[in-house]
Each structure stands twice: as C-alpha cells, then as structure tokens.
Amino acid sequence: MAQLNQLYDYVANALEVVEMKLIRDRNDIEDDSINFSPEFAHQVFGENESIFGYRDLKVRLYYTAGALNMYLGCKYSSRVDERDGLKADDVTSKISQLLTSGCYFTSIDEFCSKLGKDESFVPFGEMVDALTVTEGGKERHFEFYSCDANTPGFVAFHTRMQTFVMWFVDAASYIDLDDPQWMFYVCYEKYTNSEGKTLYATVGYTTIYVYYAYPEHIRPRISQMLVLPPFQKLGIGSKFIQVIYNRFKFDDKVIDITVEDPSDEFRRIRNVIDVRNCQELASFSPDKIKNGFTSEMVKEATKSFKINPRQCRIIYEILRLRCTNVNDEKEYKAYRLEVKKRLNVNHHKQVNDFQKLEKAGQDISILSAGIPTPEERIEQLKLEYKELEEEYQRIIDKIN
C-alpha cells in the first residue's frame, strides 16, 4: 500500500502541469503572471488527461508572441525507474506529435534567439477591420486580417497557430490546407515595445469553409474560432463574427451562414450580435413580434445578415421575451407555450415515428424504452424551458 501511495505522487493532471505562455521579450520567460493553462488535454494525454512517471512535473510550452515559434521543455524533481513494468510517459514525444518537425525548440536559448525576429513580424493578408479596447485606463489596438492558403508565408504560420486548437477546442482536428475552400481571419494586437517599436502579437483566428449550394450559391460555415486566453473577454470573438457577417452579407450568392458544432460561449456571443442586428429590422419591431414568428422575419434576417432560419427563430424568441410583460399572466403564458411547442417538436416526431413502426407490425419495445411518459416529458419540458429563459435573459441583459 505504501508503494502504491508513492506511485500516486508520480501521476500529474496535465491541465495543471502544462504551462503555456506568449513571449514578447526575454523578461516574460520568468514572469509567471502571464502563464495560462490548457482547457483540454485528452487529445494529447488520453481520456484521463494525466501524465505518469514524474514528481513535481512542469511542462513548458512557450510561443513567441508574433510568429509563434515554439519552445517545448519539461522539468521535474524525480522520475520513476523503468522496472517492474513501470515506464514514465514520454511527454515530449506526445506533444511533438502535434507539432510540425522543425517548428519548435527544446533549447530555451535557441528559442530566445527567435525573439529578435518577432520585431520584423507583420500580419499576413489584408487588413479588413480594427478594434480599440480600453482596459485599465489604457487603450489596446487590435487588427483583423483576411487570408487563405495562397497568402505568402501563411501556411507555415498556420501550422504553428493551429496547434492551440488541440488544447482549447474539444474534439478539434487539423484542417487540410490543400482544399481551396478554406478562408481565414486572424486577429493581432498592435502594440509598442519599450524601445518604441511597433510590434504585433497573435491573438486568435477563425476558419470558414465555403460550401457549394445548388445551383450557383454558397453556404459559408464557421468551423473553428479561437481567442487565446490572455485576450478573452475583450470583445474579440464578437468582432470576429461581425467581420464574417460583413464579408458575406452583401454577396447575393450566399444563402446563409452556418456554424459547425458551436460551443455554449460561441452561441451566446452569436446570439447577442444577431439580436442587436435584427432588432433594427422592420419585421422584428415589438408590435409585429408579439403576433408570432413569420416567414417575413426569416426573409429579412437572411437577406440583411445571412442568418439561417433556425437561428432566426432563436432571435425571435429572445426579442419576444424582451417585449413580453412577464407580470401579465396571459401574455407570459402565451410566450411560454409557443417556446415549449418548438422545444417539443423533436419529441413529437420521435413518438410519431415509433407509432408508425408499431402500426407496421414491428417490435419497438427496445427502441421506445428511452421515451419518457407524458408526465415525465412535461417535467422535462419545464426544466428545458426554465434553462432556456434564463439564457435568453442573460442575452437581453447584455443587450440592455
């Protein structure tokens, strides 16, 4: 038992021991205040996100702030002996599998030698928008650039930049840059160093895949969006979405803009933007919105902002809640029933499908085992609606 307890000391949580940092100058190497940790590690170290074989382990993954040249290093006080079937995880090997050969250093001195080259680093592609944020009484300036695989130098840079998705996007995968349908927007912070030089630091990026739609249309899909932790909560994600909207909203070939597996945070940001945009449209005026969801809303939202019908319905529900008097029981009940009806569509479809199978003489006992009873479904629906209204209210508060 004592030996087993000792082995526990050699098991580390990867989310706690992997230390990431964006380095602007040599002083940042020793500045722990700018450290940040990954959100996920299962794609590197397995489902348990643990590393075995080291005591007091620290895994350092540093990037030069602009060009994203990388340093990978490990530090520990002791390591298990390779005996009795025990073997320490090869941490460097597991991480280096994510990295392109030759794009990272294992020597901190070699890594630091690349910091000077960051002074000549400039963004790739064409600048399409900018954002100024006041934080702590100081202004910070961000620029957004459009580029693709044909942009000179971008492919090698993207190879380094996309390594972040394995740590911050669940179930992420690298994309095939040989496919010409990919588009990219990258955000950089433009800042001045202590010597008065203007430099750029990489902030985040988003990818868009442009799908063909018969007969001569396209449907852009936002695939990945990542804002690095030191730059979150500054409005960068919102600006990315608006930049994409601005790119496509006047293009008659675009049917609508969709999103691939959006996170809860992305949905919230997108909803805020879409509500702000749609509240200015005639079909979403308070006097019309109380009369129910209409095809005119879909038509106008799609034409003006390329919002797809499903998303348009969500925006309608948020705006209708905003102008609903919740103290008026009749008005409030009408709103709740309409939303619950939409939430219950999939359940009714499933029940109807099983009923058709049953009428056709098929045994559905196993298939239908997971279907709730009418009473259970009512309780589920109450909970679903409650959570949805709370989320809608957060968005309304943000808008207000």
Image: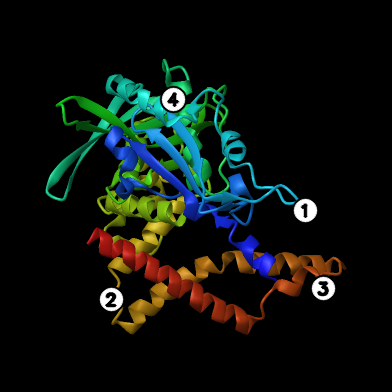
* Above or below: residue 320 compared with residue 41: below
Label 4 crowd bin: few (<14), some (14–19), many (20+), radius 10 Å: some
Q: SS class of the residue under badge 3? A: loop
Task: Give the mark count.
Answer: 4
Residue 183 lies in what quarter of the image? top left
393 shown above or below 120: below
Q: Which residue does the image show at 33% across and 48% down from the upper left?
A: 32
State which quadrant residue 251 falls in: top left
Three-letter code for the amino acid on which mark 2 is drawn: Asn
Q: Secondary structure at mark 2?
A: loop
Of badges 3 and 1, the one in the foreground is: 1
Q: Quadrant of residue 174?
A: top right
Question: Which residue: 46% across, 42% down?
Answer: 60
Gap in Å between the C-alphas at discs 4 and 2? Answer: 52 Å
Q: CA distance from mark 3 to mark 2?
A: 45 Å
Where does the image place residue 107, in percent across and percent down from the top left? 46, 29
Q: Which amino acid type corresponds to the residue marked 4 in the rendered image?
A: Phe
- In space, the residues marked 2 and 1 are separated at their CA atoms by 70 Å
- Circle 2 residue: 325
Circles 4 and 3 in contact, beta carbons < 8 Å:
no
Residue positioned 36% across, 65% down in the render? 392
* Amino acid type assigned to the residue bearing label 1 in the image: Asp
Earlier residue among tags 2 and 1: 1
Q: Point out the tag, 3 or 2, that comes first from the N-terminus.
A: 2
Dot 4 or dot 2, earlier in sequence: 4
Mark 1 or mark 4: which comes first in sequence?
A: 1
The disc label shown at residue 157, or none: 4
Name the mark on residue 365: 3
Q: What crowding class fits label 2: few (fewer than 14 Cα within 10 Å), some (14-19), or many (20 or more)? A: few
Viewer-proximal residue, 383 or 44? 44
Label 1 near label 3: C-beta < 8 Å?
no
